[in-house]
Amino acid sequence: MMSEDVHPPENAFNLLPVEDKKKEKAPRYVSKFRPAAMLERKLVKEPIRTMGPARVELPSPENFLKKHSKEPKLPEQMQSSKDVHKTCSFTERKPPVPRRNDKPLMGIHTKRDFLKETPVLVPMKPQPACVDTSKGHKQVLENSGLVPKFITRKDFGRVPAYLQQRSEAERRAREEYENFVKAEREQRAMKHMTQEERQAILKHLKETWDKLHHEYQALPLIIDTVSQRATKDCLERQMKQLEDDINLFERFKIIYIPKDD
């Protein structure tokens, strides 16, 4: 079946000439809005109606663009430069320094009242207000009672209790520390040596020095052994220490010594 549709069977009538049939044209499309469009086309219109004026003033041929007309020009001087006297700031003579006997001008008064002008010139900060009705009634919040006033509190201006407790604790700690330092200072304090004790110690030092000096004088003139040399060095060292102590006690009349534990 498919082959017959693609290749129909041969027939003798197919050899007969066939007249060409003319195709009929479809009717031309006409818009239904054509009468309105024709009427709108016949209306009175002006060109470039929405783009600005159609007729503009043409430039005059006399007002052509001239040379250097677009360059910026300096303003004309009202006064001639010849009449203006200019002075150099470096060579200009400055006013003289006032003398020592010149007195300043005193008693100059003005009629301006600065106490009245200053509040007017300084912008005032608007007072906070509250609008409480739909008609715009406004009242100042300062004395309305809607804002808390801390100066009206019962404990206003008084020291809080916790600060008093802290101050008391700090005071007790400071007293305890001062007592402790005082006790330590008294414990480590030096006591004054009396004149009797000083004289007794000085006398004992001199007697000891005399005794060592007697032993030193008893040494032989020729010292050739190690023991004799050691004895001599020990005696000289002890005598030097005693001389320093005696000199110290004789120089200072007032002597402080640590307390016995």
Image (spheres, rainbow, N blue to C red):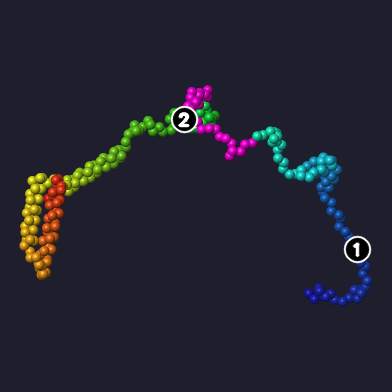
Quadrant into which the N terminus falls: bottom right
Is residue 202 shown to the viewer in this render? yes
Residue type, numbered disc 2: Arg
Q: Which mark is residue 22?
A: 1
Local packing at callout 1 (Cα closer than 10 Å; few below 14, some 14-19, many 20+) is: few
Local packing at callout 2 (Cα closer than 10 Å; few below 14, some 14-19, many 20+) is: few
Q: Find the magenta span and give its range.
A: 86-115
Residue 18 on image: x %, y %? 92, 69
Residue type, numbered disc 1: Lys
Q: Nearer the viewer, residue 23 or 106?
A: 106
Between the C-alphas of marks 1 and 2, the distance is 132 Å
Residue 61 on image: x %, y %? 84, 42
Residue 59 on image: x %, y %? 82, 41
Residue 226 picture quarter: bottom left
Q: Nearer the viewer, mark 1 or mark 2?
A: 2
The answer to whether the residue labelled 1 contacts the one labelled 2, judged by CB atoms less than 8 Å apart, is no
Q: Which residue is mark 2?
A: 100
| Mark 2 residue element | loop
Most extreme residue toward the front, as rendered? Answer: 221
Q: Is residue 92 magenta?
A: yes
Residue 196 on image: x %, y %? 8, 46
Residue 52 picture quarter: top right
Q: Is residue 114 magenta?
A: yes
Q: Nearer the viewer, residue 58 or 14?
A: 58
At a point 82% along the width and 43% down the height, the residue shown is 64
The answer to whether residue 112 is above or below residue 12 is above
Does label 1 or label 2 sit earlier along the sequence?
1
Magenta stretch: helix, strand or loop mostly: loop
| Mark 1 residue element | loop
